[in-house]
Image: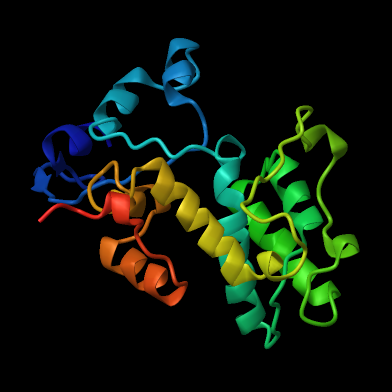
Amino acid sequence: MLRALQSGEFERVGGSRPLRTNARVIAASNRDLERAVREGRFRSDLYHRLAIFPIHLPPLRERPEDIPLLAAYLVTRKARQLGRSIERIPHGILDRLVAYEWPGNVRELDNVLERAIILSPGTSLRAEAIQLGSAAATKSRERHLRTESSGDGESDTLAAREREHILRICNATGWKIKGPDGAAGKLGLKPGTLYSRMQKLGIRRPARHEPNG
């Protein structure tokens, strides 16, 4: 394996003639491999052959501001798959989701929401349907989702949650949409996709942020 990663050559078992390959290897791990190498729990020669273009994807617990938008997306997708219509995630549920540590990352969030959809009659998720893990996985420092609206009506709809999140990211980036520091990149969307979502949600760039010329 090391030889194939380094030079693109390998030999069949029992063979004597080297063969060439142009295969690309994409490796992923939820472990801190640099630390594992230092502690002698992962081979350094393998790590340095794999770590050519590392990409760090922070776990869900390190980006709680993404949870409301992820929850809105996952509920919409899962409800459609299950033949249901869920239009509202109450504030209290979102606060609980944001305060949870998510040891199982996005996959755990997906499963929790799918179970909640199944257990919730009507078009709104029920608080009692949200079944999280142990209390030890809940953050000691409670995080509260701050939104522009404090009401319990329209601001609870999935579209309103998505709108608030996009507005927050756009304001944080000074309404720069494109580029690595733009809102589209931070939201994990293509600029064209973000523009379409903004148009659908009635989001307009403030006059003071309109590009000159």
Residue 100, given in percent of the width and then of the height, sits at 74, 42
Residue at horizontal 44 percent and vertical 25 percent from the top: 33
The quarter of the displayed image where residue 101 is located = top right
Q: Is residue 38 left or right of residue 94?
A: left
Residue drawn 76% across and 73% down?
Answer: 117
- Residue 119 position in % (x across, y down): 85, 73
Q: In front here: 181 or 139?
A: 181
**Residue 79 horizontal/vertical position (percent):** 66, 79
Looking at the image, is 188 positioned above or below residue 6? below
Is residue 87 visible in the rendered structure shown here? yes
Q: Specify the farthest residue to the front.
A: 207
Camera-side residue of 60 and 5: 60
Q: Quadrant of residue 164?
A: bottom right
Q: Residue furthest bottom?
A: 83
Lateral position of residue 27 relative to residue 133, left or right: left
- The structure's colour scheme is rainbow
Q: Which residue: 77% across, 63% down? A: 152
> Which residue appears at 21% of the width and 37% of the height?
5
Q: Quadrant of the C terminus?
A: bottom left
Relative vertical location of residue 181 with respect to residue 32 in this rendering, above or below: below
Compared across the picture, whether 44 is left or right of 121 comes to: left
Would residue 100 be visible to someone looking at this image?
no
Quadrant containing the N terminus is top left
**Residue 211: % across, % down:** 19, 53
The front one of 45 and 205 is: 205
Give the mark count: 0
